[in-house]
Structure formats: structure tokens, C-alpha cells
Image: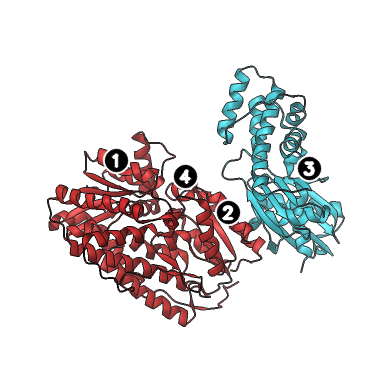
Amino acid sequence: MITAGIDMGSKTVKVVIIRDGEIIGKAKTLAGFEAGGAAEQAFAQALDEAGIAIDDVEAIVATGAGRKNAPYSTRDITEVGGDARGVIRLFPSARTVLDVGAEEGRAIRCTEDGKVLDFALNEKCAAGAGAFTESMSRALEVPVEELGPMSLKSTKSIPMNAQCAVFAESEVVTLVHLKTPKPDIARAVHDAIASRIVSLARKVGYEPDVVLIGGVAHNPGFVDSLERALECKVIIPENPEFIGAYGAALAAAEA
Amino acid sequence: MATKQLYQTRPLECWGKAKAIREQYYRDYATAHERGGLRWAGGAWTFGAIPAGLGDDVWSITSEPYAASIAANKDFSMRCLEATERAGYARDLCSYMRNYWGSVILDEYLWGGEFPKPDFIWQDHICCSHAKWYQVVSDLEGGIPSFCIDVSVGPYETVNERKIDYLVGQMHDGIEWLEKVTGRKYDDEKLIQAVYNECRATAVWADVCTLNKAIPAPLEEKTMYSLYVLGTLMKHSKQVADFYEELRDEVRDRVADRIGAIPNEQCRLMSDTQPPWGFLSLFRYLEKYGAVSVGSLYTFGLIGVWEVKPDGTWGPRTTPQELGIEITDRDQALRILADWNLSKPEWQHFYSPHLKTDMMVRIAREWSLNGVMLHYNRGCEGLSLGIAENRLGLIEAGFPVMTFEGNMGDEREFDLTKTMARVDAFMETLGFKKEG
């Protein structure tokens, strides 16, 4: 059975097409102001990669913040449901899912069959999400993709206490004015995000295996900070930002 | 897809009457002086039965429901909050207090005209904010005589005669003070009737809430907010006690006829603490899932007075009149009033979150709930204190919990869209699908 999942994220749209649970096509585009059009574009690319036509796809389920505006889909599920399904299919031993996307961080505790026992989401502030690293990279005048490797060069922990992205940015500016080395500031930024995410994880009562998904999982500096804060290793799938869409595609194959 | 019609539903017949009583209350307070009467201000928790002994022409404004009414009017609320902040008060104080102060500072009454200055303040100290609230009001209004009763005697399970004496001694002092500041002679018979009324009103409200154990629930919480509020305005009045009996009779009929609050009930929830008053549409959103909030410790226990019945379940506390107790003098009336109020559920968790968890788990079990929706209310320290521990206790007892952050009276601290997204995820985890 061929099904598809569309993850209408706040920054990017991800599409995954699966055949009997195996990914045969995937694509990602920037959501922009016309997320519907972006989703159509991503869907076309994923179909190309899979080498099939849209009529070959038997069911399509949407997830993500903009899921109500997804094209083609006949049903939608929440990000929590999509994440849990996707992760448990790939890692049956996973009991905790941490998803750090552009605008939202979430922690999910689930059973071996993907049933969600509890979940926690970040509140109104983006200090526990990817958008925060982007704004901090601008403040440091460092490309965002370099922020992670740069922070790994630091061995110094500088606490950032602000619980708000805006106030945290002013802390970074202060550190810049104090001539603090950029790697130390980068590590402080990642430690701050990790502390928010671990706070969510503690709220649901995390237990191993812990799987990290979402675009921020590509950032090695954040992963290092998170593992230090959790005091355990996290599992990162090959394409961590596609797991929500993969879970939606799995949901499409259900009943 | 149309909403499933699992149960018959119909509007409450006494709904219009409830609205009229509330409107009249605020008008009566504003116009009291025109009729030669007195105005007093104090919290919804205060011992309102005591000033009733000054006469039938004495009208009150209770601070929390007034502030909640402001909060529901977002434009006026924002002007009040900003006025309070301009005056130098911090933004993280109790949001009821900030709305109320703003109305005083702007000298604008929500029901029109200037803010009607009270003749005296009659308050009790249930939390830090209540202790300071009217000190500031008195200062802002140029000095209004104030009397406060300290109620910090511990949870009801520890109450003894010595603790009752502590409250009753203050009440006796308060009556002497009332006579002095108003120049009126105190009428003990009116006090006695007010105490009877209060016991009747608060027990009957608990009875109404008990009826919501039925499936389908005859009432949902958004409606209950508009009904329990009458008790927060004047729980000692005959009018409210009579109205609650009329309401109770109608709700009994709804239960007998299986009339539901919503037509598609399939999921039963409770909330906690004051809701974000400007966003009660959240409760309507639940209905898309066939979910009904059947109440909360807050709606049940702020006005309702309860007891454990012989079968072990919660029900309305037996009133002195039901026990055949005849109140014959001031001291007896005050002792009953003190004991009655100290047994109120909402009073207990100021002393320990574990007491609150026990009551919440009881509600979750007896009202057959599928889950709980906790409001981490940044606007009220008193009622939010310990709520994270309540969450753990509920989860341990087997009840799924969703939390959301917000503020009962400051819309800047609540995000409706995100909260609805959170409801979506919670409903999905509980296995309920949206209809329509």
C-alpha cells in the first residue's frame, strides 16, 4: 500500500511517501506565506523521487501546525500523534520522543505500540526551539549551520538564565560586549535550549530510549548539550525532520 | 460532518433569571446611595453575612467577580491593566487585583459611570493578594475604613474550638467596628437569617454540582461559571439561595429526562482554577470532540460546601436547619458561619497541594472523568500554587492530564490558538475525534 504524510511545519513543509512502511520518496520546501503551494511543490518532488504518480497514492494524512491547510490530504493528526507513530516504527524500544522544530519543542512519552502516555509542549516562548538558534546566530554573526560545530570547541559552561528568547538575546549581546569567545557563547545558547527541552522531558518523566527528532537534531552542538543535560545518549534517526511526516504516512495506512 | 446527536439538549429555563440577578446586583451597588443605602467592598470569600446585619439597604461589590467581568471585556481590561501599570504596580501581581485597581484608577465602572466608591471595606485574608488588595484601594480612594479577618487557622481537618474562637473573636470585633463606622445599630436577627441563607445557598450549589455526576452531564462548565457567580456575589442572600433551589430543581428534571448540556457527550473532563475569562470559547471548542467539562474543584468548591456522605461519596454539607439547629444569638450565628466557611473545599489547598489532589482525584472518580485540563494560571498565585503537584497526583491516580499556561485576567498571557492545538493533541491521545 502506498500512502503519504505531509508535515506542514511552521518553517518548512515535509512530505514522505511510503510503500508498506518503507520510505520511497521524500521532499522538503520552505513553507513561506503560501504553505499550500509549498506543499504541492514538495509533494511533486517526493512523487518524482518515488517514481510514481499522485493517483498511485492511496491515502494522505497531514500533520504539523498548518495541517488544516494541507493540499491532497483527507485526514489530519496532531504532531504528537505523528511523531510517536514515526519514532516507534523506526525504534520500537523508544519510550521518549523529543521533537525540536523551528517554533516548538515537545516531549512525548509513549508505549511500545506508539500510544501516547503523556506529552508536554513549550509555552509561548520560542527559547526552546530552532528559531532561537537562528536569532542567536544572527546576533553572533555566524551562519546557523556553523553554530553547532563551533560550540563543540568550547569546554566552558556559561549559564544563560533568561526564560525568554528576547531576554536571552540581550544576554548574548552582553556576552559579546564582554569579549566572551564565540564558541563559549554558542555553547551557552545550546545549553539554554537543551535546558528548556529537558524541562519538558522531565515533565513527562522521560525514560530510555530517548529519540531526538526535528530539524534541530542536525545541530551537533545542541545534541551535545542535550545529552549532557539528560545524562544519556539520544538516538537520532537518519532524517530527523521527516519523522512527523513519516508518522502521518503510517497513520494514512491505518484503517 | 454534523455533530452526533446522542442526547437531547435544551437551554436552561432559569438562565435569564440568573443573568438578571447579576445585572441587578451591580446596579444596586452603584445606586445604593440614591436610595439612602450603604456600599461596601470585599472579596468573594469574605464573611458577607455579617454586614447584612446592618440592614436590607446595604449593597456590596465583591472584587474577584467584578474583576473577572472586566477581564471578559478585553478592551476595558487592557485599559485597566495599563492604568495599573502606569501607576507603578508590577505586571506579575494578581490579575484580578490589577483589573480592579485599574477600574478605580480610571474611575470607570464596568456598568457605566464613575467607579462607585464604597463606604467601607469588609475583607478577609485568604492569600497574599487579598491581604494587600484593599489596602491599596483604600489608599487610592483617599482612605476608606477597612476591616480584615485573618482566617489562617489551617485546613478544616485540624479545626478545633480554639481556632473557631480566633475567627469568632475577630467577627465580634468587626461588628462593633461596623456599628462605629456606619453609625447604625446592628440587627442580630438579620445576621441569623443571612447565616441560614448562606448555608442553604452553598449546600444547594453543591447539590447542583453533585447532579452533574449524571451521564450525560446536565450542565457544562461554561454555563456553570454564570451560575456559581451568584454565590460569589451574595451567597448570604435569600435571593441567591432561592434561585439555587430553583436551579437545582430544574437540573434534577434534566437528569431525570436525560437532557445533556451538549448533544454529543462522549468525553468528560474537568478544569482547574479560574479560566482565562476572555477566552471561554475554549470550552465550546471542546464540544467539537464531544467533550464536556463537567466542572472543577474551583466551580464546585469555591461556593459549594461539601461533606462525605455515609456511602463515602461527596455531597452537599447538611445545613444547620436540616439538622434542626435553631440559631438564637449572635455568637452562635458567628460560630456556625466560621465553621461552615472553614470547611469549604477551596479553602483547604492553601495549606497543602495534597489536600487539593485528594479532592481532585475524588471528583475525577465520582464524576467519571476521562481526563483533566489544568490551567497553570499566572494570574493567581493562591489557586495555582501546587498545581504541578496536583498534576502528578492525578496522573498517579490514572487520569490523563493536559496543562496549559494562561492568565485569568490578563489576555497578554494566553494564546488561544496554541491552547486549542494542545486540546487537539490531548483529545487525540485520549482517542476522541473531532466532529463537524
Q: What residue is shown with label 3?
A: A234
Do the residues indicated by labels 2 and 1 lie within the same chain of the protein?
A: yes
Residues at discs 1 and 3 in contact (Cβ within 8 Å):
no
Q: Quadrant of the C terminus of chain B?
A: bottom right
- Kind of residue indicated by mark 1: Gln
Q: What residue is shown with label 1?
A: B135
Which residue is at a point 53% across and 59% down the rendered structure image? B358
User: Which class describes the residues within 10 Å of circle 2: few (<14), some (14-19), or many (20+)?
Assistant: many
Q: Marks 4/2: CA distance?
A: 25 Å
Looking at the rendered structure, the secondary structure element under dot 3 is loop
Q: Which mark is residue B391?
A: 2
Looking at the rendered structure, the secondary structure element under dot 4 is helix
Is label 4 or label 2 in front? 2
- Kind of residue indicated by mark 3: Val
Kindly indicate which chain is depicted in red in the rendered structure: B
Q: Chain of mark 1?
A: B
Is label 1 or label 3 in front? 1
Q: Marks 1/4: CA distance?
A: 26 Å
Q: What residue is shown with label 4?
A: B412
Let me know if residue B113 appears in the view.
no
Kindly indicate which chain is depicted in cyan in the rendered structure: A
- Kind of residue indicated by mark 4: Arg
Do the residues indicated by labels 4 and 3 lie within the same chain of the protein?
A: no
- Kind of residue indicated by mark 2: Arg
- Which residue is more in the foreground, A198 or A122? A198
Horizontal arrangement in the rendering, residue B432 relative to residue B26 (left or right): right
Q: Quadrant of the N terminus of chain B?
A: bottom right
Q: Is residue B3 above or below residue B256?
A: above
